[in-house]
């Protein structure tokens, strides 16, 4: 992806987050979208009034199923990620919002049939719009007007949309962006006095990732490494809802004790859904869902992470053969796909603490963790 395209994506994401409009184009369709979570009601109403027909609520098929708009589907059914559009009968009647935002209804299953018309599949530009909302950490539900390419009314310009090529958001192009090493400093830690932090910045202007280099890992041998996704609550506050804090400290200690290693500290809070959505997922878990279903109910996948940045950082540091501290087989597979050889998986489990037993057993049962 060129630098100009990456800049456009960042602008479009910022515009959605600020409550503005984004126009996504591909060779078939133009789709003009706003986030109902962010856009002011009068701007949503202006979008809905653009054409003679109602605007649509754009969501994934899985979210539509969970909101009771279509028949239920399995949590691993690949059709779950397809975009669908449902006409919003009256933008001023807030009941359509129940299908967009599960926090309003608890389980999201109370979207009223009268609020939304018949569901239909949406095009690739709409799938890209949902990917953009996810990239921006918003609920993946948008108010949208979709038309064949070139057929949006001229009045769309009054909404001053950021215009982007929907093909920029093709699967696999979303997360990465080439990484550049931008800063390095010595930071002695309580558990590892000989420690350096090296920061990597992605070309698309997204959040920086860190390599925590403990001791002097020997690039000639497979080094001890950990891919650790940021967890504000567990890493910083010591939350007992998860095992992240112990895993982070435990990894640093194990590396210090064995001469060295590298923790890739990845800006992928909440398995890639962001802190705000993770807190929403926690609230859903307090209402009885498990960690997987809470993500799905929000309209996200169970795990939205892309481990390419971690592979790229390891390569930049000269480590292509590693011993990986993890219980998650998906990390081993992903690193292999991106050119890092995991010569050994080193188990990295800690005893349950009285609050996280359900979370750990769900990871074992539904995400294949080896605990
Ligand atoms: N969405 C969501 N994210 C969570 C929840 N609990 C913890 N997390 C996040 O899950 C991630 C945990 O990441 P890791 O510990 O790197 O990965 P893992 O998949 O558990 O695998 P290993 O720890 O390596 O075995 C962090 O980003 C946490 O913020 C939850 O209930 N919902
Ligand atoms: Zn955590």
Image (cartoon, helix red, strand yellow):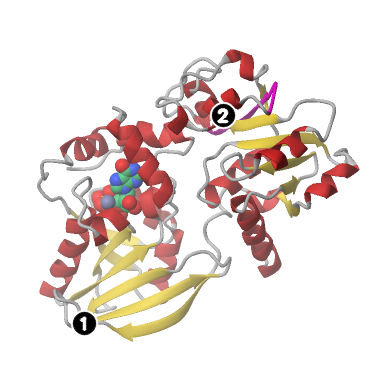
> Relative to residue 93, is residue 283 drawn left or right?
left
Residue 90 magenta: yes
Which segment did they paint magenta? 81-91
Q: Quadrant of the C terminus?
A: top left
Q: Of discs 2 and 1, which sits in the foreground?
A: 2
**Alpha-carbon span between mark 2 and mark 1:** 49 Å
Task: Identify the residue shown where x is 64% and y is 24%.
Answer: 93
State the mark number for residue 37: none
Q: Quadrant of the N terminus?
A: bottom right
In the rendering, at what x and y percent does residue 203 appear?
A: 57, 69
Camera-side residue: 247 or 117? 117
Instruction: Residue under label 1, please give it.
Output: 188
In the rendering, at what x and y percent does residue 47 appear?
A: 75, 38
State the mark number for residue 97: 2
Above or below, 146 against 187 in this view is: above
Residue 41 magenta: no
Q: Residue 209's image quarter? A: bottom left
Element assignment for label 1: loop
Above or below, 177 against 162 in this view is: below
In the rendering, at what x and y percent does residue 323 appear?
A: 24, 63
Can I make out residue 174 in this image? yes
> Relative to residue 22, is residue 36 drawn left or right?
left
Task: Identify the residue shown where x is 32% and y is 78%.
Answer: 197
Task: Identify the residue shown where x is 51% and y is 28%.
Answer: 63
Can I make out residue 366 in this image? no
Q: Residue 199's image quarter? A: bottom left
Report crowding for label 1: few under 14, some 14 to 19, many 20 or more residues within 10 A (C-alpha): few
């Amino acid at each position: 992806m060129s630098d100009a395209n990456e800049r456009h994506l960042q602008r479009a994401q910022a515009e959605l987050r600020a409550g503005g409009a984004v126009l996504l184009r591909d060779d078939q369709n133009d789709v003009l979208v706003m986030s109902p979570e962010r856009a002011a009601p009068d701007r949503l109403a202006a979008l809905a009034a653009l054409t003679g027909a109602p605007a649509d609520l754009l969501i994934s098929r899985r979210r539509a199923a969970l909101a009771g708009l279509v028949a239920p589907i399995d949590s691993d059914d690949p059709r779950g990620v397809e975009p669908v559009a449902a006409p919003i009968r009256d933008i001023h009647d807030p009941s359509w919002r129940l299908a967009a935002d599960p926090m309003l209804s608890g389980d999201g299953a109370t979207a009223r049939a009268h609020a939304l018309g018949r569901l239909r599949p949406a095009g690739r530009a709409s799938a890209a719009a949902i990917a953009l909302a996810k990239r921006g950490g918003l609920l993946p539900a948008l108010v949208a007007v979709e038309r064949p390419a070139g057929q949006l009314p001229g009045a769309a310009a009054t909404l001053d949309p950021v215009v982007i090529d929907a093909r920029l958001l093709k699967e696999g192009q979303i997360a990465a962006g080439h990484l550049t090493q931008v800063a390095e400093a010595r930071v002695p830690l309580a558990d590892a006095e000989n420690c350096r932090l090296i920061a990597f910045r992605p070309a698309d202007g997204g959040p920086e990732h860190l390599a925590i280099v403990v001791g002097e890992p020997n690039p000639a041998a497979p080094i001890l490494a950990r891919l650790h996704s940021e967890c504000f609550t567990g890493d910083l506050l010591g939350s007992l809802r998860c095992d992240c804090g112990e895993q982070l400290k435990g990894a640093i200690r194990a590396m210090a004790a064995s001469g060295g290693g590298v923790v890739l500290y990845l800006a992928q809070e909440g398995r890639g859904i962001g802190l705000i959505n993770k807190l929403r997922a926690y609230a859903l878990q307090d209402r009885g869902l498990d960690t997987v279903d809470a993500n799905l109910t929000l309209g996200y996948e169970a795990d939205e992470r892309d481990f390419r940045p971690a592979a790229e950082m390891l390569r930049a540091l000269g480590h292509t053969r590693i011993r990986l501290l993890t219980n998650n087989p998906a990390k081993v597979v992903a690193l292999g796909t991106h050119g890092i050889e995991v010569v050994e998986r080193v188990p990295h489990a800690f005893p349950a603490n009285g609050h996280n037993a359900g979370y750990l057993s769900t990871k074992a049962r539904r995400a294949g963790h080896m605990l």
